[in-house]
Amino acid sequence: MLQILLQNQIPFDFIFPEQLSERLKKYDVLVLSDFAALSEKECEIIRDFVKKRRGLYASGKSSLCNERFLLRKNYGLSDVLEFLMKSASYTRQNCGIVNCGRGKAAFMPEVIERVKFL
């Protein structure tokens, strides 16, 4: 994800979990690139962010674990992203963009790297 942002000259910033509630207010989109560990409080902050007409892009195992990296029964943001963890494997049926309140959320279970041709 970082490479995509840099190559396309898209401005971005890093927000650490302890800064989430104060710094998230000034952004329109939050990217969780395979960010597995989120506390319930952080999930709630992100839910409120999306419902207030903001955007969320999550990929990989984003919100699959709590802040101690213990596996949840379901993704912490499953209500926002509208998918359920059926097994440890990811399927393409889980991909998509959904409306959440006045905002939008997108989830991609895996990112497939481009094939380099010689």
Image (cartoon, rainbow, N blue to C red):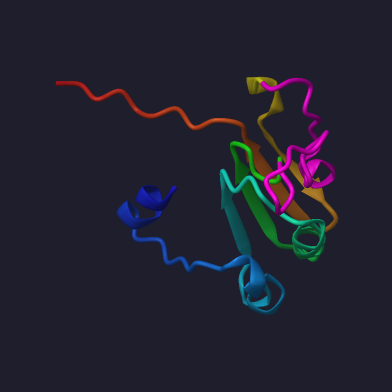
In the image, residue 80 lies in the stretch drawn in magenta: yes
Quadrant for the C terminus in the image:
top left
Q: Quadrant of residue 31?
A: bottom right
In the image, is residue 56 above or below residue 96? below
Q: Residue at x 75, y 64 (%)?
A: 49
Q: Quadrant of residue 28?
A: bottom right
Between 102 and 70, the one lying in front of the other is 70
Q: Residue at x 62, y 48 (%)?
A: 57
Residue 17's x, y, as percent? 64, 66
Question: Start and end of the magenta stretch?
Answer: 65-88
In the image, residue 78 lies in the stretch drawn in magenta: yes
In the image, is residue 59 above or below residue 18? above
Please name the predominant secondary structure of the magenta segment in the image: loop
Q: Is residue 105 left or right of residue 59?
A: right
In the image, is residue 71 above or below residue 93? below
Q: Is residue 74 left or right of residue 4?
A: right
Q: As drawn, which residue projects farthest toward the left?
A: 118
Between 37 and 1, the one lying in front of the other is 37
Q: Residue at x 66, y 30 (%)?
A: 95
